C-alpha cells in the first residue's frame, strides 16, 4: 500500500465532523428553545384561565349588583325606604306640589344686586 492511500484512509475528516457537531448543537438549541416555549405557553394558559375565572366572578357580581340597583329604583322600594328611614317626604303625585320653572342665571363678574356683597360695593 502506498503512503497516499494510508493517509487518505486513516485521516480524520474534520470538515464532516465539524458539520455533525454544528448540526447536533443546533438541534440541541432548537430543542431547548422549543421546550422553553412550551413551558411558557403552559404558564400563560394558566394565567389566562385564572383571569377568565376572575372575569366570570366579576360579571356575576356585576349582574347581582345591577339587579339590586334596579330593584331599589322601583317606586315601591323607594317608598319602603322612605318609611323605614322615617323621612317626611311628600309624594310627587301630590296636588299640593307646584312646579316652578327655575330662572336661568348668567354668570357675570359683578355679584348680583340682591347680595350683601353688592350692597357693600354700592355703599363705598
Image (cartoon, rainbow, N blue to C red):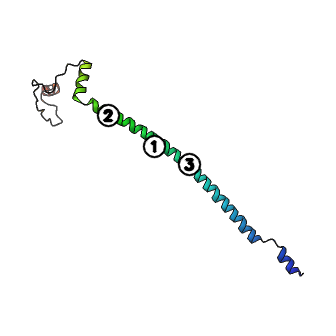
Other-residue count near label 3 (Cα within 10 Å), few / some / many at <14 / 14–19 / ≥20: few
Q: Secondary structure at mark 2?
A: helix
Looking at the image, tell me whether mark 1 or mark 2 is earlier in sequence order.
1
Asked if 68 appears above or below 47 in the picture, the reply is above
Q: Secondary structure at mark 3?
A: helix
**Spatial CA span between label 2 and label 3:** 38 Å
Q: How many marks?
A: 3
Q: Quadrant of residue 71?
A: top left
Q: Which residue is mark 2?
A: 67
Looking at the image, tell me whether mark 2 or mark 3 is earlier in sequence order.
3
Instruction: Return the x and y of residue 69 as percentages of the image width and height.
Output: 30, 32
Other-residue count near label 1 (Cα within 10 Å), few / some / many at <14 / 14–19 / ≥20: few
Q: Quadrant of residue 1?
A: bottom right
Residue 65 relative to residue 8: left or right: left
Instruction: Return the x and y of residue 124 as percentages of the image width and height.
Output: 14, 26
Instruction: Return the x and y of residue 25 as percentages of the image width and height.
Output: 69, 61
Asked if 80 appears above or below 50 in the picture, the reply is above
> Which residue ends up furthest to the top in the rendered image?
86
Residue 34 relative to residue 10: left or right: left
Q: Which residue is mark 3?
A: 42
The disc at residue 52 is 1
Amino acid at each position: 500500500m502506498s503512503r497516499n492511500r494510508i493517509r487518505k484512509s486513516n485521516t480524520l475528516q474534520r470538515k464532516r465532523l465539524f458539520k455533525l457537531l454544528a448540526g447536533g448543537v443546533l438541534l440541541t438549541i432548537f430543542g431547548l428553545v422549543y421546550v422553553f416555549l412550551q413551558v411558557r405557553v403552559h404558564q400563560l394558559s394558566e394565567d389566562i384561565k385564572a383571569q377568565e375565572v376572575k372575569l366570570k366572578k366579576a360579571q356575576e357580581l356585576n349582574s347581582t349588583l345591577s339587579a339590586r340597583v334596579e330593584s331599589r329604583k322601583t317606586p315601591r322600594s323607594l317608598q319602603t325606604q322612605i318609611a323605614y328611614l322615617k323621612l317626611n317626604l311628600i309624594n310627587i303625585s301630590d296636588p299640593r306640589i307646584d312646579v316652578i320653572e327655575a330662572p336661568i342665571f348668567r354668570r357675570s363678574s359683578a355679584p348680583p344686586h340682591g347680595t350683601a356683597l353688592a350692597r357693600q360695593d354700592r355703599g363705598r
